[in-house]
Image: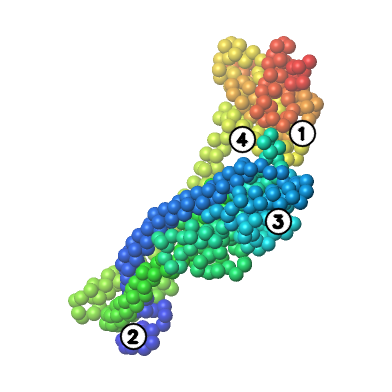
Amino acid sequence: MAPLDSLDAKQPINSLPMKIIFGVFIATFVTAVVVSWIPLQSIYLQLHRDLEATFPLILNRVAARTDEWISDGQREVEQASTSDRIALVPRNDSEKTTRDAALLRRLRVSEQLEGFVILDSAGKPQLEIGALPLLSEETYAELFAQHESRPFYLRQTKEFALVAAAPLRTASGEILGYLFGFYNTAELGDLLSSDALKSTGEIYLATEQAKILTPVRTHPLDGRWSISNEIVTTYTNNTQIRSYSNYAGHYVLGSSRRLQNLDAVLVVEQEYETTFQTVFSISRWVITADLLMVLVFSLLGYRVTKTIMQPIYALSDAAQRITHGNLDVYLSEPKAQDELFLLTRAFNEMVKKLRESREEIEEINARLQDQNVELHYANNLLERISITDGLTQLYNHRFFQDHLAQETRRVDRSGDPLSMLVLDIDNFKKLNDNLGHSAGDQVLMEISALLRRTVRESDLVARYGGEEFVITTSGTNLEGARQLAEKIRSSVERHEFKAGSPPQIVHVTISIGVAEYKGERKNFFERADRALYRAKERGKNCVVTDVETYS
C-alpha cells in the first residue's frame, strides 16, 4: 500500500492524480477553445459571406466591361474592313502608294486598337500599321489560321497580344485578304481593376491551359506566364469561392468566370491572410488567455487531488489484489463518517458478495455450456428443416433454386457441362383418388429413396412440388443425362410399391424431361419442363430431351 505522503513525491504519468490533472487540463482547454471558437467562427463566416457576395459582383462588373471593350474593337475592325475596297495586290508602284495612303487614312488607330496587319488570301503579309509586337513568320501563320475566329490572343509572341479579325472583300464578295486589329492591351490594366479589392487583391486573365495572359499588379511575373497545373481546375471552375496557393505561392481566396467574347477566364484573388487579418489578430489574444486559464485550473486541480487521493490508495491496492483473484481482502473502516467511510464499507461488502458469487458463477457457466450444446443441435436441425422437404427428406424448392444459381455460375466459369432432369409421376391423382393421400405419400417417399440410390453423390435431387421432382447432374452432358433418366424410369417401372391400408402392391411409372445448360439459367428449367410435357403427350412413361421437342 502506498504511504500517506506518496503525493509529495513525483507522480507517474499513469497515476490517478495525474489523470485527474490531465482531465482538468483537457476539460478547461476544450471549454476555452469552444467558447473562443464560436465568435471567431462567426467573424470568419461573416467575412467569407462578404467575399461570396463581393467576388461575383466584381467578376460580373469587370467581365462586362472587358467583354464590351473586346466587342467594340471587333466592331471597329469589321467596319474598317467594309469601307474602301482596294485591291491588295497592286499592278505597279504607283497603285501601291495610292493603296497604302488610302489604308492609312481608313485604319487610323482607335481607343481599342493600336495597330493593324493585312494578309492576302494566301496568308502573305501586305501591310503593317501602328504599334505592333515583333511579328515572325510563325505569328503570321497563327494569324492566318485563326482569321475566322472571334477575338483571340496570339501564342507565338512573348508579350500578350489580343487580336480581332475581319475579311476584306471585293464588291462582288470575293475575299482579297484579311484585316487584323491589335488591341491596346495597356488599357486592360484599367479594365481589370476594382476598388472593392484590398491592396493584396488582383484580377487577371488566364487560360484553361494553365497560362496567365495579363500581368498581375501585386506580383509581376517577369515574363513567366505559366501557372501550376494543380490550380487549373480552380481557375476554370465557376461554382464557388475556393482557397488555394496561386502562381506566386501565396495562399489566396479566389473565384473565376469565363469571358463571352474571348476564350479566357477572368480570375479574381485576395490573399487569405489579409482577408482574415482580424480573425488572426483576435485568435492570438484568445490563445494567450486560454493558456493562462488552463494553467490556473490545472494547478487548482492538482491541489484538490492531493487532499483526497491518499485514502484512495488503500482502496486501489486492495482492488489490484482482487483483480489477481485474491478475495481474502478486508479494509479497516475510517473513523470519520464521511464519503470515504461509506466507500470503504461498500468495498468490504462487495468483496463479501464476490466470494459468495464465485461458486454461483461457476455453476451457471456449467449450465450455460450444456445449453450451448443443445442450442447448437437445435440450430443445425432448424437449418436442415428449412432446406428439406418434410415428407421425402429431399431438398425443397427454395434450396434447389439457390443451388441452381450457384451451379450455373460455376459452369459459366469452368465450361463444364450441366444437365437437368424434371420427373413427374404418371396418373398420381388417380392413385390418390383410389388409394387415398396416405398411399400417395408412401409412393412419394419410396420414389425419393429410389432416386437417392440411383444418382451420384454430386448430383442434387429435390422435390419441386407435388409429385414433381428435379435432378441436377454436374459434369454430365445431354446424352449422359438422358441415359441416367432412362435408368431412373426403368427402375421406377420395375419397382413394386407398397401403398394403402392394408398395404398392397402398386406399379407406378414416371415421365422425364431432360435439358442441358446453354448459358441461360432463366430458361434452363423451362426447357426441361417443356420436354416433360412432351413426354406426357407421347403417352407417359418415357424420357424426352429438350432437343426432341423441336424435332
Secondary structure of the residue carrying numbered label 1: loop
Q: Earlier in the sequence, mark 4 or mark 1?
A: 4
Q: In front: mark 3 or mark 2?
A: 3
Quickly name the residue at label 1.
417
Hey, which residue is sitting farthest right in the picture?
479
Counting from the top left corner in percent of width and height, residue 358 is at 39, 64
Q: Earlier in the sequence, mark 1 or mark 3?
A: 3
Q: In front: mark 1 or mark 3?
A: 3
Quickly name the residue at label 4.
402
Which kind of residue does numbered mark 4 sit on?
Asp
What distance separates the C-alpha of mark 1 from that of mark 3? 71 Å
What distance separates the C-alpha of mark 3 from that of mark 2? 86 Å
What distance separates the C-alpha of mark 4 from that of mark 1? 18 Å
Which residue is painted at 35% across and 60% down in the image?
46
- Kindly tell me whether residue 361 is visible in this rendering: no
- Kindly tell me whether residue 547 is visible in this rendering: yes
Hey, which residue is sitting farthest left in the picture?
337
Mark 3, other Cα within 10 Å: few <14 / some 14–19 / many ≥20: some
Which kind of residue does numbered mark 2 sit on?
Leu
Q: Where 415 falls versus 150 (above or below)?
A: above
Which kind of residue does numbered mark 3 sit on?
Thr
Quickly name the residue at label 2.
7
Q: Nearer the viewer, residue 93 or 536?
A: 93
Which residue is painted at 72% across and 32% down in the image?
519
Counting from the top left corner in percent of width and height, residue 372 is at 49, 50
Hey, which residue is sitting farthest front in the picture?
94
Q: Earlier in the sequence, mark 4 or mark 3?
A: 3
Quickly name the residue at label 3.
139
